Image (cartoon, helix red, strand yellow):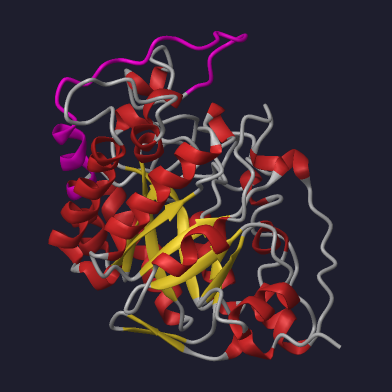
Amino acid sequence: MATTQALFKSIQVGPLTIKNRIVMSALTRSRSVPKDVPNALNVEYYRQRAAGGCGLIVTEGVLVSQQGTEWPNAPGIWSKEQTQAWKKVVDAVHAEGSVIFAQLWHTGRVSHPDMPAQKKLVCQTLPGLPGYVTPTEVSDPATLVELFKRAAENAKEAGFDGVEAHGANGYLIHEFLDSTSNKRTDKWGGSKENRSRFGLEVLKALTDVFGADRVAIKLSPTGGYNDMGMPLEETLETFNYFVSEVNKLNLAYIALVRYSPMLDPTERGTKHDVIASYGHLITAPTKVVANCGFTPEEAAQYIEEGKADLVAFGFAWITHPDFANRVQHGKPLDNAPDFATLYGTGASEAEEAKGYTDYPAAVY
């Protein structure tokens, strides 16, 4: 009979003692209504999951600038108001005994220039299907690196234990890494070394603020999502180089996302074993976080076999605020998902609780 005991051993990640090996992956929920500032509902959502036994919580993607947003009601951390609001989330998570990292996010070319969020603080979706446009060229990407650094400074002020750079899913850092999106001919594009430059510069900027042992990065080498994906040989070459260079920074962890058909709607992804291909490149003190599609039993096996140090779960945390406690105590994962409320409705804060903070915990 499969056991999950390995998930419930504590682990040292940099200066932080994580009480178990279970990570709550970043999960965009679009509940920061009426604008991009975390509210009381967000505080309760994260508090519930900390109380539910999570060792390390990674926030939903937190936008580093208004210009970098993709959709309505996603929170940012570029303003004083946002920073103070996040402090309430951090305090609630710490009070329940969990550790919390802010995932810093810029969507890059995915953000449509006609989105009102690009022009004003009130964010609305575009009517109809406007389609893709040619991304705006940034003459000096170093200016974008500074946005991440400023966001990290705000995250530190809010009391976060660390920050995770969102380098996955076809967003800005990933866009620089992938040759199908990065067509630059200057020092930021072309060779794998040049395409890796932006992500490495972001990480160095974050370590200037937090120290390397409180900084992490999430990567999805298989691509797929947001039309990403290089040929296999180039994918292996690029990510072998990038992960090796990141490993030299002695970060807290590198999160590796496995291939998932759900994250590859246009079937452009490059299928390969992500953990086997890159996990061996990550050495102490940096930890390996395996992500995507794990059952608790498979996660425990990965830890026992030394393939990962921690394992991130996503959807299970949406429907089970006490996911870790359920696994530890053998309770069923039986809350049915409400897909209609997955990303909210943009309604009032009270109405947004449905499908967000109203999933019940088990009886212990």
Residue at image location 16% in from the left, 52% down from the top: 205
Is residue 2 depicted above or below 73 in this figure? below
Is residue 170 depicted above or below 327 in this figure? above
Q: Quadrant of residue 133?
A: top left
- Residues 344 and 143: in front is 143
Residue 219 location (% of width, % of height): 45, 51
- Residues 172 and 275: in front is 275
Q: Which residues are magenta?
A: 124-149
Is residue 178 depicted above or below 238 in this figure? above
Q: Is residue 281 toward the left or the right of residue 162 in the image?
A: right
| Residue 110 makes an appearance in the image | yes
- Residues 180 and 48: in front is 180
- Does the magenta stretch mainly form a helix, a strand or a loop? loop
Quadrant location of the N terminus in the rendered image: bottom right
| Residue 151 makes an appearance in the image | no
Is residue 143 depicted above or below 1 in this figure? above
Residue 345 location (% of width, % of height): 64, 35
Residue 184 location (% of width, % of height): 27, 21
Residue at image location 63% in from the left, 57% down from the top: 292
